[in-house]
Each structure stands twice: as structure tokens, then as C-alpha cells.
Image (cartoon, rainbow, N blue to C red):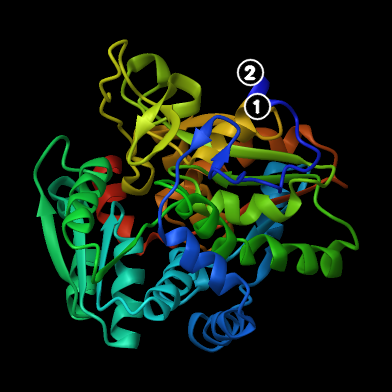
Amino acid sequence: MTANNAKPESYRSGPDESGHFGMFGGRLEVEQAYNQAQLDPSFQSDFDFFAEHYIGRPSPLYFAESLTQELGGARIYFKRDELNHTGAHKINNTLGQILLARRMGKKRIIAETGAGQHGVATATVCALFDLPCVVYMGSTDIERQAPNVFRMKLLGAEVIPVESGTATLKDAMNEALRDWVANVEDTFYIIGTVAGPHPYPAMVRDFQSVIGREVKEQILKAENRFPDVLVACIGGGSNAMGLFHPFLDDNLRIIGVEAAGLGVDSGKHAASLTGGTPGVLHGNRTYLLQDSDGQIIDAHSISAGLDYPGIGPEHSWLNDVGRVEYVSVTDNEALDAFQLCCRTEGIIPALEPAHALAYVTKIASALDKDNVIVMNMCGRGDKDVFTIAQALGVEL
């Protein structure tokens, strides 16, 4: 642990005045506009109004009784953000960012997307507020996420295929950043995760923290206490930071689940904290999959939303100071958990939270029956059914 990653008085206090979480992060001029918006009660009032009446918040906290009985051990709750409008947690963040873009007078919106959920959420709020929308998406992801591509187009977005690199999320973000640099005066870049230059990691976290704040109220009502364990999947890590951040100073176990792909030892994975080292990508210093020369190594995951060679800088910091445990789950383990959830709970999860669920299945039976686990069910599985059918050898 390095000196500038020493344990803080509060885990919720970052970033510092330079936009860093310890040694991780970076900064940007959007910061001034966001700082001003935070001081304006009308900005939060607008967010709360649309969160309730458009997104459908609060999302339920659901006791997964059948799954709990199947696994034995701890009581398992799902924070059901897949029931939000557009089917994932992404809409929380796109709503907050487009309200900021309008406040700044921006007339054009761009975004990147991997699994397509962030692209759909961005296209949705652009349609709501009548702003043009351009979404960059890797051609590999366009092929495996065709339903979401069609949804974006229905909502009026222009979807631009990216052919460079592995044609996945990293490459889409590269192209979006190039567009933004060239058109910064009239364009706002809605970043989809807790990555990029400051204030994006903190700003996206703040908008997504509605998840954890709701859980605090809901679990007290359901169990009259806080949970023993929080679990969420990690790509860039926005759904996880949204759940984790309000609880960071509380006495409970917090676990982030990365995508181990074909296995960390295989080299075909997306587990940046498990198999990466600190470096710089997309305007922030964080843990990355890279070689000894600092060249980015291609990530792999069956989940398009986790197929990214880096992670949000706050997660890197929380890893180094030891507040959050980071583990990894393979493609096959996620597929098994996906099928288990369908069979026991009648819920078809996205492949992203299926990774989190796979780790829940590993720990639940080892915990006492009076223990409580809360897992973020951050997306629904409509977008993944063709990928899963192919992986399972099912003809449609």
C-alpha cells in the first residue's frame, strides 16, 4: 500500500481537490458545472422528479426466497434495478448527466456503449429532452447486442460502428473521446461508467448512489438492520459504486465481482484488479490489463458490459486501501448462475449481474442463515438471450 493510498478517515470522502482517489484518477472542466449544479436545490429536485415519475424509482428490494432455500445459508436480496425504465441501472446516470448538459447549454449528446444498455439509456433521455444523440459502439458488440442497437435507432440515435482494435467497449470509448475533443463547444459526452477524467468517476457514482441510499432504507424495513454482505458485478463499475458508496463507512463486507472470462490464467479475461497493473487510459490512472510496455491487452468476457480492460479509479483505490474485496468469475460460472436464477426465481438476469450472482452462490451456503446478502440485479437479460443460446448450444 503506497503512502497516498493510506487509509482515510472516511472511505466516502474522495476524490480530493485534484480529482484523485489516492493515486488514481484525473480531472476535467465539466467539474465547475457539476459543482455548481450540486449547490442548486432545483437540480436535485429535477433529478428526483424524473427518477420517480420517469425511471420508476425506488426500485424494489426483493427477498429471493427460492434461491435462498436452494443454496441454504444466508438470506439473499436482489436490488432490482433491472426493473428501471430501459432495463438497467444506466438510466440513473444518463438522467443526471443530461440534466447537467442542458444546464450547460450543450446542443449535442454523444456516448459510448458496450452491452448497449448505456446507449439505450442515453438515447432515451435524448429523446425525452429532444437532443440529438450519437452512440459509438464496437462492431463486435453491435453483432452480439442487436436488439439494443435497434432500440437505440428507434429512439432516434445515430449508432456509429467502431472497427478498430477488438471493436468492443474500449474502442468505442476511444472514438467517443476523439469526437468530444473535436466538438467540445457544443457537445456533452455522457460517459457510462465511473471512469474517465474527473469529475466523471465521482459524478457517475453520485448519480448511481441512489441505489445504495434506497437499499439502506429498504433493508432496515425488511430486516431491521443493515446487510452483512453487499455484492455487485464490476466492469467499469458504476452499478457497484452506486450500491457500495453509501455503505463504505459502515461495518459490513463489500465484494466486487470482475469477469474472469475463460480464466485469469488463460489471458482471456477482463479482471483488471485481479490480473492488471496501474496505468493510464481514457483520461484517468487506474488498474489496466497491459503488457510490460504499457500497451493495452485485449479484454474478454461473454458479457459485453464487462468486456473492458480497465476499471473505475475509485475501485482501484478501494482495492488498494483494502475496503472492498475484488474477486472474479468465469464465463461458465456466470452462465450457470444465469440458468439458476431463471429456474428458481423466474427472473432472467443480464450476463453482468449473473457474474455477481455466481459469486453469491459460492458464499451463501457458508454463511449463517441469519446473515443477509444484498446483490445488485443491475440489468435484465433480454439483450443477452441470443449470446446465451449460442453459448449453451441452443438453436433459436
Judge by depth and name the residue closer to the eye, 105 or 375: 105
Residue under numbered circle 2 = 2
User: Where does the image place residue 132, in percent across and percent down from the top left?
Assistant: 21, 78
Left or right, 227 with reference to 276: right
Judge by depth and name the residue closer to the eye, 191 or 163: 191
Left or right, 7 with reference to 131: right
Q: Cβ–Cβ below 8 Å for labels 2 and 1? A: yes
Residue under numbered circle 1 = 5
Extreme-top residue of the structure: 292
Question: Residue at 85% of width from left, 70% of height from top?
Answer: 221
* Residue 9, quarter of the rendered image: top right
Observer able to see residue 227: yes
Judge by depth and name the residue closer to the eye, 136 or 373: 136
- Check disc 2 and give the amino acid type: Thr
User: Where does the image place residue 172, in percent across and percent down from the top left?
Assistant: 21, 49
Q: Which mark is residue 232?
A: none
Question: Residue at 55% of width from left, 53% of height from top?
Answer: 202
Question: Residue at 50% of width from left, 27% of height from top?
Answer: 273
Q: CA distance from mark 2 to mark 1?
A: 5 Å
Q: How many neighbours does mark 2 have within 10 angstroms: few (below 14), some (14-19), or many (20 or more)?
A: few
48 is higher (above) or lower (below) than 38 = below
The secondary structure type at the circle numbered 1 is helix
User: Where does the image place residue 365, in percent across and percent down from the top left?
Assistant: 73, 36
